[in-house]
Amino acid sequence: MTDARTAEADPSWDGLRGHDLYAACMHAAKAGDRSAMNRLVKELTPLVWQVARGNGLDRHTAEDVVQTVWLALFRNLERIEDPKALAKWLITTARRESRTVAERLNRPVPLTDELAENMPSSQPEPEAEAVRADRDRRIWEAFRRLPDRCQELIRLTVLAGRAEYGLVADVLRMPRGSVGPTRGRCLRRLREALDATEGTADA
């Protein structure tokens, strides 16, 4: 009884962080330790949540996606052998599920002629829409000129936020302290590429 209480009070992952924490919790969870899975949920839910919200989902829909992603992990936990792949697996699964849900929600609903005539338009004025579309096109053109690692770093830090830089470092396998400075350099390159795109357009 004493040993059981001690193990519960001082689990094998106590004091660990990052991949070491995920590895210990995954090992214990595969052995049936519910508290280990709860720790994984606590540590990584903010990242899954931000991915869902970053794909344009509202709060309620994002909550459903988070639950779906964790259920998927419970079903596939035995298949994930490398703890370093855990955060990346969650991000990929959350993106896929978010896009699937977003596509389903955005499917056009047939309207009667009467409803269509009386429904106020939520679309922007053509001039404003043209400006926005041109701006977005230039941003994406500049973004695609960046190295792949810069693109992934910007995506993850925008989705996860500064509070989750540790998770971003784990996913990209880079020192946590280098995430912010590297992100800054990538953003400067993005601005330079955007300026070059705008300069070409104005020429």
Image: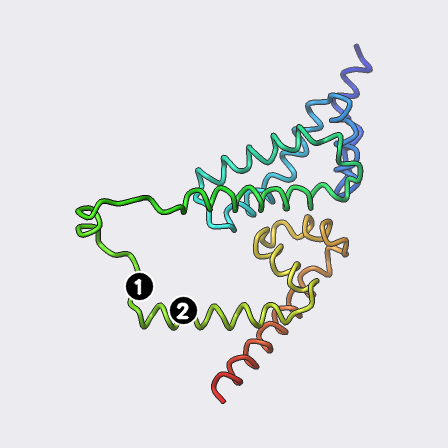
User: Is residue 151 found left or right of 105 in the rendered image?
Assistant: right
Using a 10 Å C-alpha cutoff, classify the residue at mark 2 as few (fewer than 14 neighbours), some (14 to 19) or many (20 or more).
few
Please tell me which residue lies in front, 152 or 168.
Answer: 152
Structural distance between the alpha carbons of marks 1 and 2 = 10 Å
Quarter of the image where one finds residue 190: bottom right
User: Is residue 199 found left or right of 75 in the rendered image?
Assistant: left
Please tell me which residue lies in front, 166 or 101.
Answer: 101
Instruction: Count the labels in the image.
Output: 2
Name the colour scheme.
rainbow
Dot 1 amino acid type: Pro
Using a 10 Å C-alpha cutoff, classify the residue at mark 1 as few (fewer than 14 neighbours), some (14 to 19) or many (20 or more).
few
**Residue beneath label 1, please?**
124
- Which label was assigned to residue 132? 2
Mark 1 and mark 2 in contact? Answer it, CB < 8 Å: yes
Element at label 2: helix
Quarter of the image where one finds residue 22: top right
Name the spot of residue 111 as percent of width and height, x first.
26, 45
Q: Residue at x 64, y 63 (%)?
A: 151
Q: Is residue 46 above or below residue 145?
A: above
The quarter of the image holding the N terminus is top right
Q: Residue at x 60, y 57 (%)?
A: 155
- Which label was assigned to residue 81? none
Q: Residue at x 50, y 47 (%)?
A: 53
Name the spot of residue 108 as percent of width and height, x first.
36, 47
Q: Residue at x 68, y 28 (%)?
A: 37
